[in-house]
Image: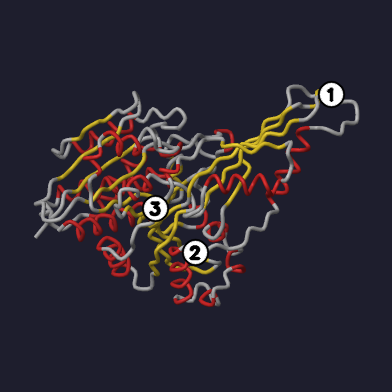
């Protein structure tokens, strides 16, 4: 029998690692994730496990380590990303790269996306070695760069140039997890993401006639662009189901969290939370605006970038044409801001698997009143690269995020509670133990 785990000591160790990890600035762009890869790798090497540092791009290292099993089952990969989105430092109440602990919260860019999840995976990996688990399958730890700008220099590169390293049976990454609240109700709702939306960034360009800012003007490119953007913002696109969202709604209805949804009426339910609404339609948000060169010059050209996320099965080319047709203004061009690759289109994976059932079993054994459902990630993750290879790659961070923690994704004052870090370490280890022994 493995020795009993001193969870108080593990929690303290995880918190220390988490704070130090948050202090490594891996804002992407530019990334510079190599120091983070070595930070994690050195902790792994201290346990007597070899760690490989793979730089497909200089300064953007992948940390990759493996604990060998007996080969009776195929490997399980724990995967996370080390890069984070940039920070508007003046908007934060706490320094974004110091890992400040206050009132049971750990503040820092990457706390929830996804350095906290990375630490949970790391502790499960280290504990598997320390406990001397007799593994039936190889257990892999993989920390990659560049997820926040599409993953081409991280997991995408790894799949293309080192495919033997991702030849696994299952993978766990970000994209799903637990929520402590749903529709204003306290709950323990865990979503295991088996699919995700496709990123499709569009650039809108309006062209007008320049002129002096002191004279009435009928052909202002900025006004033309704003009209197009407001029209898009008010666009009612209806509801589209996918197999994942249909199962999601059915299970929520069974649990009493979406009354009436079993009849298929989710229009009212979509208004409950933005995240829920995003699972039923292609979303678009204005994220960048650029117009004008001087206060007294009417701009000849005005541009905006809109972040669109498409439901599985939707074509990026068709969506661009829908946007263009809805704007219905030949003076507003609609082009890709970053060309979507059809080969990067999301692929669904089955949720009737050993890993899904193990995740469900661990959660329900820990919290009898929890609800576990298959779900769809409304953003993009590195899971898509593995799903395209037929690998059940699941988004699952095993903790219960509050509404405030969920709001921290890509936002100011991002934080993860110490309690959630502790819960995540314990549940991730138990998932690994059951899957690999």
- Depth check, mark 1 against mark 2: the one in front is 1
- Seen from the viewer's position, the closer of residues 378 and 116 is 378
Q: Earlier in the sequence, mark 3 or mark 1?
A: 1
- Seen from the viewer's position, the closer of residues 309 and 175 is 309
Q: Which mark is residue 181?
A: 2
Chosen colour scheme? secondary structure
Q: Say if mark 3 contacts mark 1, CB within 8 Å.
A: no
Q: Viewed as shown, does residue 304 lie left or right of 150?
A: right
Q: Viewed as shown, does residue 241 lie left or right of 139?
A: right
Q: Viewed as shown, does residue 112 lie left or right of 134?
A: right
Give the distance between the C-alpha atoms of the residues marked 2 and 3, in whole angstroms: 29 Å
Give SS at disc 2.
strand
Q: Position of residue 106 (x, y in %)?
A: 43, 45
x 76%, y 32%: residue:
221
- Seen from the viewer's position, the closer of residues 88 and 342 is 342
- Whether residue 434 is situated above or below residue 319 in the rendered picture: below
* Residue topped by disc 3: 347
Q: Say if mark 2 contacts mark 3, CB within 8 Å.
A: no
Give SS at disc 3.
loop
Give the distance between the C-alpha atoms of the residues marked 1 and 2, in whole angstroms: 53 Å
Give the distance between the C-alpha atoms of the residues marked 3 and 1, in whole angstroms: 50 Å
- Depth check, mark 2 against mark 3: the one in front is 3
x 51%, y 65%: residue:
182
x 67%, y 58%: residue:
236
* Residue topped by disc 1: 211
Give SS at disc 1.
strand
> Which quadrant holds the C terminus?
bottom left
x 41%, y 30%: residue:
31
């Amino acid at each position: 029998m493995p020795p009993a785990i001193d969870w108080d000591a593990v929690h303290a160790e995880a918190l220390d690692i988490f704070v130090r990890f948050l202090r490594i600035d891996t804002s992407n762009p530019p990334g510079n994730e190599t120091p983070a890869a070595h930070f994690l790798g050195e902790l792994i090497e201290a346990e007597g496990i070899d760690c490989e540092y793979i730089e497909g791009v200089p300064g953007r290292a992948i940390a990759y380590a493996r604990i060998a099993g007996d080969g009776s089952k195929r490997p399980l990969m724990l995967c996370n990303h080390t890069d984070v989105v940039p920070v508007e430092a003046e908007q934060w109440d706490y320094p974004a790269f110091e890992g400040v602990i206050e009132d049971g919260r750990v503040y820092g860019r990457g706390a929830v996306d996804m350095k906290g999840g990375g630490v949970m995976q790391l502790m499960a990996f280290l504990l598997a070695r320390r406990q001397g688990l007799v593994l039936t399958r190889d257990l892999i730890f993989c920390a990659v760069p560049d997820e926040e700008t599409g993953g081409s220099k991280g997991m995408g590169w790894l799949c293309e140039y080192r495919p033997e390293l991702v030849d696994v049976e299952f993978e766990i990454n970000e994209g799903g997890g637990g929520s402590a609240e749903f529709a204003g109700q306290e709950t323990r709702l865990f979503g295991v993401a088996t699919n995700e939306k496709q990123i499709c960034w569009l650039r809108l360009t309006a062209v007008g006639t320049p002129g002096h800012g002191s004279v009435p003007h009928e052909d202002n490119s900025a006004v033309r662009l704003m009209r197009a953007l407001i029209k898009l913002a008010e666009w009612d696109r209806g509801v589209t189901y996918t197999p994942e969202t249909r199962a999601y709604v059915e299970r929520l209805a069974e649990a009493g969290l979406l009354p009436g949804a079993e009849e298929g009426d989710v229009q009212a339910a979509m208004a409950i939370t933005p995240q829920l609404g995003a699972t039923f339609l292609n979303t678009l948000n204005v994220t960048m605006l650029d117009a004008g060169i001087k206060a007294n010059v009417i701009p000849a050209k005005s541009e905006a970038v809109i972040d669109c996320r498409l439901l599985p099965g939707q074509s990026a080319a068709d969506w661009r044409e829908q946007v263009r047709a809805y704007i219905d203004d030949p003076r507003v061009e609609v082009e890709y801001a970053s060309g979507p690759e059809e080969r990067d289109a999301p692929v669904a994976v089955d949720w009737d698997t050993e890993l899904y059932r193990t995740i469900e079993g661990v959660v329900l054994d820990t919290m009898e009143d929890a609800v576990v459902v298959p779900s769809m990630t409304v953003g993009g993750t590195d899971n898509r690269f593995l799903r395209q290879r037929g690998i059940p790659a699941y988004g699952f961070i095993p903790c219960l995020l509050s509404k405030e923690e969920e709001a921290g994704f890509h936002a100011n004052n991002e934080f993860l509670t110490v309690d959630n870090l502790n819960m995540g370490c314990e549940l991730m280890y138990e998932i690994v133990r059951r899957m690999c022994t």
